[in-house]
């Protein structure tokens, strides 16, 4: 069966995809099925890649969550949505987010995004329209409304103490 040219062609396509960047099992399956390979061939290719540890959804989820948090400065909601789209199981998603937040807390990422967007301005210097625009952009980055609200209130000095 290793001499099966269809299997080998599918395997080579999967390896090319993996050489570009890490992929989830779901992504490889989808790409191969879209390429016209039958489900049995796709299952064999995926099983072989898992055996070689070229496909590992837990490792992929950790790496992708770290990339999105550290490089794209995304909040948990956007990271979660991205991993769901890639076909990662919910429990692996939650583990990946928890792991990345040990090194890269969401509040710190939010603070960095706000500082970059506002440059040298303070949130208290923004008018209502500017605050709304900032809030929408932070929501689009995947930060929760409560986190955004609390962060901006603290930055505006609404609380007596900062923690």
Image (cartoon, grey):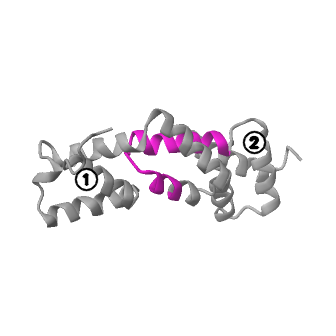
Q: Position of residue 63 (x, y in %)?
A: 54, 39
Q: Position of residue 132 (x, y in %)?
A: 22, 65
Disc 2 target residue:
50
Task: Let me know if residue 56 is in the magenta part.
Answer: no
Residue stretch in magenta: 57-81
Decide which of 75, 17 is in the foreground and name it: 75
**Position of residue 126 in the picture relative to residue 87 (left or right):** left
- Secondary structure at badge 2 equals helix
Q: Position of residue 69 (x, y in %)?
A: 43, 43
Gap in angstroms between the C-alphas marked 1 and 2: 48 Å
Q: Residues within 10 Å of mark 1 (few under 14, many from 20)?
A: some
**Position of residue 159 in the picture relative to residue 145 (left or right):** left
| Camera sees residue 20 | no
Q: Which mark is residue 96?
A: none
Q: Nearer the viewer, mark 1 or mark 2?
A: 1
Q: In the rendered image, which quarter contains the C terminus?
A: top left
**Position of residue 17 in the picture relative to residue 109 (left or right):** right
**Position of residue 101 in the picture relative to residue 107 (left or right):** right
Decide which of 146, 90 is in the foreground and name it: 146
Contact between marks 1 and 2 (CB within 8 A): the answer is: no
| Camera sees residue 80 | yes
Q: Quadrant of residue 43?
A: bottom right
Disc 1 target residue:
153
The residue lying at 37 percent from left, 54 percent from top is 147
The residue lying at 62 percent from left, 55 percent from top is 27
- Secondary structure at badge 1 equals helix
Decide which of 135, 68 is in the foreground and name it: 135
Q: Can you say whether 131 is above or below 97 in the image? A: below
């Amino acid at each position: 069966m290793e001499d099966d040219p269809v299997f080998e062609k599918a395997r080579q396509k999967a390896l090319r995809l993996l050489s570009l960047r890490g992929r989830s099992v779901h992504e490889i399956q989808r790409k191969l099925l879209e390429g016209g390979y039958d489900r049995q061939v796709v299952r064999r290719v995926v099983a072989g890649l898992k055996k070689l540890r070229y496909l590992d959804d837990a490792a992929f989820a950790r790496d992708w969550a770290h990339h999105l948090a550290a490089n794209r400065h995304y909040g948990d909601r956007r990271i979660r949505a991205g991993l769901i789209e890639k076909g990662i199981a919910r429990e692996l998603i939650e583990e990946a987010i928890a792991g990345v937040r040990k090194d890269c807390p969401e509040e710190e990422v939010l603070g960095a995004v706000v500082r970059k967007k506002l440059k040298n301005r303070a949130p208290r210097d923004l008018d209502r329209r500017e605050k709304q625009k900032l809030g929408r952009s932070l929501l689009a980055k995947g930060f929760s409304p409560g986190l955004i609200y609390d962060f901006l209130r603290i930055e505006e000095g609404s609380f007596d103490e900062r923690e």
